[in-house]
Amino acid sequence: MNILSKGILALSIFGLTATGADAQIIVNIRPPRPRMVVVRPAPPSPRHVWVDEDWVEDHGQYRWHGGYWIAPPRPRAVFIKGHWVGRHRGYRWIPGHWR
């Protein structure tokens, strides 16, 4: 690999790292779950999993997104519920995802 290729690779990795770091939203106090009744409709298929609670990023802050059905991307996938993770400056929401 020549010097130009190594430089381009290093800049690409740095750019991806910097972009990912800027996307995190840290809050000092976790927002409370809104008091609301979510009506759970029938599942679209037996494979779908109900997601109770989810927060989504909306213009630099978190917004509540009520329950919804989600289908697994592959057989035997396990859904990991969204959760708050404590950081040294506050909390960050980790969205639900398939593993």
Image (cartoon, rainbow, N blue to C red):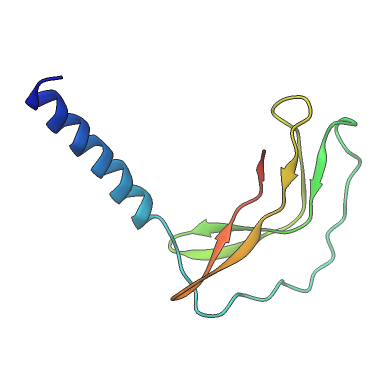
Q: Along the horizontal axis of the image, is 52 left or right of 13?
A: right
* View extreme (left): residue: 3
Q: Residue at x 67, y 39 (%)?
A: 98
* View extreme (bottom): residue: 29
Q: Along the horizontal axis of the image, is 7 left or right of 34?
A: left
The foreground one among 75 and 2 is 2
Q: Along the horizontal axis of the image, is 35 left or right of 73?
A: right
Q: Residue at x 15, y 29 (%)?
A: 6
Q: How many marks?
A: 0
Q: What is the quadrant of the N terminus in the image? A: top left
Q: Residue at x 45, y 75 (%)?
A: 88
Give the percent coordinates (x, y) of residue 90.
49, 75
Quarter-wise, where is residue 55 in the image?
Answer: bottom right
Work out whether 35 lies above or below 77.
Answer: below
Q: What is the quadrant of the C terminus in the image? A: top right
* View extreme (front): residue: 1
Give the percent coordinates (x, y) of residue 62.
54, 65
The foreground one among 24 and 8 is 8
Q: Residue at x 72, y 25 (%)?
A: 74
Give the percent coordinates (x, y) of residue 86.
55, 70
Quarter-wise, where is residue 21 in the image?
Answer: bottom left
Work out whether 77 lies above or below 20.
Answer: above
The foreground one among 91 and 49 is 91
Quarter-wise, where is residue 85 in the image?
Answer: bottom right
Give the percent coordinates (x, y) of residue 13.
27, 38
